[in-house]
Image (cartoon, helix red, strand yellow):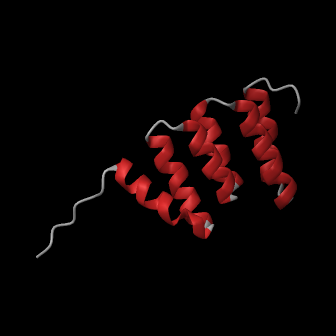
Amino acid sequence: SRAIVPLPTAEAFENLRKIAAKNEPRVFAKLGELAEKLEKYDEAENYLKQAGNPENLADFYQRRGKYLQKAEMLEQIWRNEKRLADFAELVNFAQTHEIEKY
């Protein structure tokens, strides 16, 4: 029987970089996640942007303490989805973090 041994984060990151040329959003999202774990924050942000998922990017900005950028992602989500709940989240977030733009 074969044991399941997880790949170290750095090795998994390098393996994913090799297949990133396929421009698959899920690959970019995972690369962003792994780059963040490796404290390669600029790379993580770039990969998350390429993944095209504003929710993931907003969460990344929250973890990094980049509240203005998170608010901008919340605004983008609201403009794309036109859901009242997204607008309320944006307004509440902006008030909490004293972001005057909103």
Q: Is residue 22 above or below residue 76?
A: below
Q: Is residue 74 left or right of residue 65?
A: right
Q: Is residue 85 left or right of residue 100?
A: left
Q: Residue furthest bottom?
A: 1
Q: Quadrant of the N terminus?
A: bottom left
- Residue 102, picture quadrant: top right
Provide residue 99's location: percent of width, then percent of height: 81, 26
In the image, what residue occupies the spot 57% across and 57% down? Answer: 29
Foreground of the two, 26 or 84? 26
In the image, what residue occupies the spot 83% across and 52% down? Answer: 78
Q: Is residue 50 above or below residue 4?
A: above
Provide residue 66's location: percent of width, then percent of height: 67, 31
Foreground of the two, 95 or 58? 58
In the image, what residue occupies the spot 76% across and 45% down? Answer: 73
In the image, what residue occupies the spot 41% across and 60% down? Answer: 15
Q: Is residue 57 above or below residue 15?
A: above
